Image (spheres, helix red, strand yellow):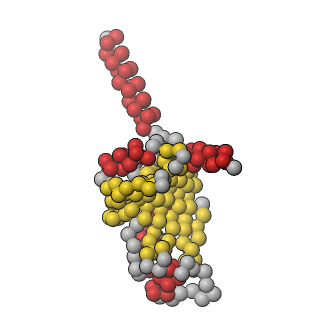
Amino acid sequence: MKTKFFLLLLSNLAVFILSYSQSSEHLVFKGVSLDGTLNEYVLKMEQYGFKNLGTENGTAVLSGEFAGYKDCIVGVSTLKQKDLVYKIAVIFPEKDVWSSLSGNYFDLKEMLTEKYGTPGEVVEKFDSSSQPHDDSARMYKVKFDNCKYFSIWKTGKGEIQLSIQHEGMTRCYVLLSYSDKINSSIIKTKAKGDL
């Protein structure tokens, strides 16, 4: 009887320890906490099927599928002086028409809202005296930096930002970034020490 009781107690303890170790104080991206060294994090992302495209200036670049979108580019950032992951950015595939670009934005915004609740800050407008009335005019506004579309979720573990971005006049895409609160604070403290 004592053996059965001891085994039951031991198995319950093991389940408790396992569930406690899987909970994280850090923001989570694709099931992995934004924590640890860059190499450790990249290895975990490779296990999820991401392809490592290389590392430069403290940022690893990977490619793969994320949130049902193929061919995403993922940047995993650290501070060069401190090998600690604190930020992840996902660039979704480029779009050349507004309906596709805004469709990606609103689809991702809906999924993020279901998971994290209503965003704390939302700006979705074009900066101009007259509003564009068709796809072509809206894309023109994006390419010339007159489109402000972003949503920000602040959680106890960090910040998530979704936005429509452009690079030059040819690349327009949706960007999703995750900034871990704990590691961002560590990096900010280190930066303040340099001042």
- Residue 122 at x, y = what percent? 58, 67
Q: Is 2 left, or right, of 122 in this rendering? A: left
- Residue 123 at x, y = what percent? 59, 70
- Vertical side of 138 occupied by 85: above or below: above
- Residue 135 at x, y = what percent? 45, 85
Residue found at the very far right of the displayed protein:
195
Residue 193 visible here: yes
Residue 193 occupies which quadrant of the picture?
A: top right
- Vertical side of 109 occupied by 157: above or below: above
Residue at screen point 58% across, 47% down? 187
Residue at screen point 60% across, 88% down? 130
- Vertical side of 72 occupied by 173: above or below: below
Residue at screen point 43% across, 75% down? 171
Work out whether residue 159 or residue 119 is closer to the camera in this orientation and state it.
159
Work out whether residue 148 or residue 91 is closer to the camera in this orientation and state it.
91
Q: Is 75 left, or right, of 184 in this rendering? A: left
- Vertical side of 107 occupied by 112: above or below: above
Work out whether residue 139 or residue 191 is closer to the camera in this orientation and state it.
191
Residue 114 visible here: no
Residue at screen point 38% across, 20% down? 9
